[in-house]
Each structure stands twice: as C-alpha cells, then as structure tokens.
Image (tube, grey):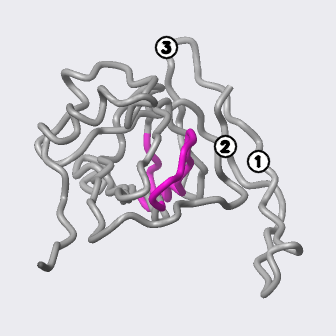
Amino acid sequence: MVVMTTVLSRQDILRLLENEPPLIEDYRDLNTQLQPNGVDFTVREVAMPQTMGRITVDNSQRLVSELAPLVFDGLGYLELMPGAYVVTYNEIVHLPNNIMALAQPRSSLLRSGVTVYGAVWDAGYSGRSQSLMIVFNPRGFRLQKNAAIVQLVFMRLTGETEGYSGTYQGENID
C-alpha cells in the first residue's frame, strides 16, 4: 500500500493540539488563527541583521548574523523601511516525527509589497521559529505586534522519520 504525503486539515490539526506536547502552543487566539489548511502564526519580535553571516561545508564554522531587536511604539507598531528583517513568532511548534511544515505569507502582506521566507520545518522539530521578512514596498510597511503574517501548513509524511536534531531544536523557548 502506498501512502501519500498529505496536507493536514483543520480537524487533523485540532486533534494534534490535544497531544502532549501539543502541535502548537502559545497561540494568541485559536478561533481566528486556525484556518482550513493550517494555522496563522503571529509576530512576537522583529529584528534587523547586524553582522555578516556565513554558511560553510562544515556546520562547525557556520555563523548566523547577530540581530538587533526593534522596539514597537506605544501602540504596538513598527514602521519598517525597505529591507530584510528577522521575525520571531509567538507560537511554539512541536512537530511529531511524521509531520513537517512550511510557512507561507498571508496574501495581505504580498498585496502590500512584503513577503516572508521560511525554511522547511523538519519533522521532529520543536521551537519558536523565525523567518525572514523582506519589505519590498519603497514606501515601507507598518506592522503591529501579534499580527498574523504567515500560515503554517502541516504535511503528513509517507512514514515516520528519526526527526530533527539540529542546532535549532528548542530555539527561542523562554
């Protein structure tokens, strides 16, 4: 029997939220964040890269850019000029060893000249992840803290894998 990779439905996600640990924790409002094909993830922090990064053949020489967190104004907004930003999400994800995820930008961002790039969220990963947000709009973009900017889409693998055990396992969990 061949089992295909499938995108999890709203009902599948709700069932996985009952697991220990749950698929997602620290969400702001599940009623508004839960979508038919995924879960909206919201902005906890935005930072600007400050130093040069480095990727090499040997991960022991990897160097991730240092970040400078930006400060939201009194109403919880940031005024972002064109450029690259690193976004940390409010939500913490706990992926079982048979589920991976991809983050896709919300269409309102794209319509505003902004996008978000995310890497593959490997099966077995747990953490409060980050993505790269690029403001292409020459007039900039105004972003409010806790706004939903991506939809995380979960996919069931054809089988269980040994799971992620890399450097970013457990990242940004306070």
Foreground mark, 3 or 1, reads 1
Q: Is residue 79 above or below residue 113?
A: above
- Looking at the image, tell me whether mark 2 or mark 1 is earlier in sequence order: 1
Q: Which residue is mark 1?
A: 67
Q: Which residue is mark 2?
A: 171
Q: CA distance from mark 2 to mark 1?
A: 15 Å
| Secondary structure state at the residue bearing disc 1 | strand
- The crowd level at tag 1 (other Cα within 10 Å; few <14, some 14-19, many 20+) is some
Of residues 35 and 67, the one nearer the viewer is 35
Q: Quadrant of residue 117?
A: bottom left
- Contact between marks 2 and 1 (CB within 8 A): the answer is no
Of residues 111 and 104, the one nearer the viewer is 104
- Looking at the image, tell me whether mark 3 or mark 1 is earlier in sequence order: 1
Give the residues in magenta. 122-141
Q: Is residue 107 magenta?
A: no
Q: Which residue is mark 3?
A: 75
